Image (cartoon, rainbow, N blue to C red):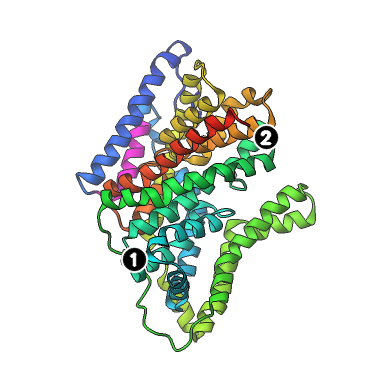
């Protein structure tokens, strides 16, 4: 089999296929098992556990000693450079939102117009609307302060409103363009973007209902009561002499949404990388710039509107970074473990194992995405790889079936997020859960989304 030349030593052709596959399987199982044991039994910090697990994976897979943690370092740096910066900016905006009373205003407005029984549905709707153009990580850091405050003010269990919010973001991330995974799959399979978007929304609505408000009741019983984490909870809800208006708060939160949506529309309408307008939209609509703009705007619409002077605004922004340092390191380590999995050749192994299957193209795309998702922890990597594997099958498909194949792959890419997924640690730390509680709630929720979506896609393919 083919392996990553930067990490694994070359193997004789006669031995490569007979021994490498089983060795990789052992390496993956040992490393994931070691991470779980180190965290749950030995109470080792997740950052250290993920680092040691990556080293064990590379060593058992046969990586040269001098490159044992090379992939881990690369993945860690890439994840922190991307997700870490977004978490930092999101934390700043969230802190301004909390300290200025803006989060209180959003929570009060939602609570005043929504009964307690309807709160999970309201949070699912809000998350879905915000999640349409947002990357999952950006949506999480923008929604968490609101979720926590709604749970506190509404006196409802955190899981009851948290799961619908996470489900709203995750469903859109996996099934609906303009998220990167579905867009890449649309391009690889030559599917029609408009049809994919329409069918994606059609599948997303019932999937969100089942995996969000309905499953939240189950997750609530499995996980038990949760306290609002001290590191991410909004500050005291003491009355402010001045508070920002609801319109200003909403405009600040929605600014990155509008900028990213503008970029997505420009990519579809203009579709010319050399055009000045598209280059401008590509710049201002990138997640980093969009969140940076929202943070800077928040200093005025939230901080200044609450009567904060320059020093108070600076203090609020500065204090936001301390509590999220641990989260950034854990998420970065998750990215490092994912990159190690990819570089030792797990993706290639899954591709070769699947080449001999003889099943429905939609089910095959879903299964390949599931296997890659379980092995690498990345929904985007799973989508891209699976789309590349099954792309020849889409050559003679109708436009609707090609779109459904995109959705089947996207559904598979969400299956059972666990310890090798940076999103797993992001959710765990923000909600203050243990590894076991995160598996019972977040991981099962992701699996429900994946299974319900493919269960809807397969019969739909017989009708359209």
- Write down the region rendered in magenta: 44-59
Describe residue 32's horizontal placement relative to residue 178 as left or right: left
120 sits left or right of 176 in the view: left
Does the stretch in magenta take in 47? yes
Report x, y in % for residue 378.
47, 40
Q: Quadrant of residue 445?
A: top left
- Most common secondary structure along the magenta stretch: helix
Residue to which mark 1 is pinned: 231
Image height check: is 404 above or below 449?
above
**Residue 107 x/y as whole percent:** 44, 71
Q: Residue at x 31, y 64 (%)?
A: 228
> Of helix, strand and loop, which one carries label 2?
loop
Q: Which mark is residue 191?
A: 2
- Give the quadrant of the C terminus: top right
Q: Nearer the viewer, residue 168 or 270?
A: 168
Counting every numbered tag in the picture gives: 2
């Amino acid at each position: 089999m083919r392996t990553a030349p930067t990490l694994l030593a070359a193997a004789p052709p006669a031995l490569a296929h007979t021994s490498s596959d089983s060795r990789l399987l052992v390496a993956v199982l040992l490393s994931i098992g070691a991470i779980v044991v180190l965290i749950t039994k030995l109470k080792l910090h997740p950052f250290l556990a993920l680092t040691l697990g990556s080293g064990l994976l590379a060593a058992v897979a046969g990586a040269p000693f001098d490159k044992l943690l090379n992939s881990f370092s690369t993945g860690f740096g890439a994840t922190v450079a991307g997700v870490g910066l977004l978490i930092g900016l999101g934390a700043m905006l969230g802190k301004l939102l909390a300290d200025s009373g803006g989060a209180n205003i959003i929570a009060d407005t939602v609570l005043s117009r929504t009964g307690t029984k309807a709160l999970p549905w309201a949070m699912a709707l809000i998350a879905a609307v915000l999640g349409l153009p947002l990357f999952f990580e950006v949506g999480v850091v923008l929604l968490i302060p609101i979720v926590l405050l709604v749970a506190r003010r509404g006196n409802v269990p955190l899981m009851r409103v948290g799961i619908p919010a996470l489900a709203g973001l995750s469903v859109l991330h996996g099934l609906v363009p303009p998220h990167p995974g579905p867009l890449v799959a649309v391009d690889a399979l030559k599917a029609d973007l408009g049809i994919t978007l329409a069918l994606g929304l059609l599948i997303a609505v019932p999937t969100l209902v089942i995996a969000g408000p309905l499953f939240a009741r189950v997750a609530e019983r499995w996980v038990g009561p949760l306290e609002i984490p001290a590191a991410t909870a909004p500050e005291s809800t003491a009355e402010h002499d001045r508070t920002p208006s609801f319109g200003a708060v909403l405009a600040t939160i929605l600014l990155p949404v509008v900028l990213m949506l503008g970029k997505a529309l420009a990519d579809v309408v203009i579709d010319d990388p050399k055009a000045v307008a598209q280059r401008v939209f590509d710049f201002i609509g990138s997640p980093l710039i969009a969140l940076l703009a929202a943070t800077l705007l928040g200093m005025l619409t939230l901080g200044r509107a609450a009567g904060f002077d320059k020093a108070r605004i600076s203090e609020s922004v500065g204090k936001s970074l301390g509590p999220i340092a641990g989260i950034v390191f854990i998420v970065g380590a998750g990215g490092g473990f994912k990159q190690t999995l990819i570089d030792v050749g797990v993706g290639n192994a899954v591709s070769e194992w699947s080449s001999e299957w003889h099943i429905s193209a939609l089910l095959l795309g879903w299964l390949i995405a599931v296997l890659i998702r379980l092995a690498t922890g990345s929904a985007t990597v799973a989508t891209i790889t699976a789309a590349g594997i099954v792309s020849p099958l889409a050559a003679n498909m109708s436009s609707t079936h090609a779109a459904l194949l995109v959705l089947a792959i996207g559904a598979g890419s969400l299956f059972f997020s666990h310890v090798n997924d940076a999103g797993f640690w992001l959710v765990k730390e923000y909600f203050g859960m243990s590894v076991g509680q995160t598996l019972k709630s977040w991981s099962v929720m992701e699996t429900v989304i994946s299974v319900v979506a493919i269960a809807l896609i397969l019969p739909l393919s017989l009708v359209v």
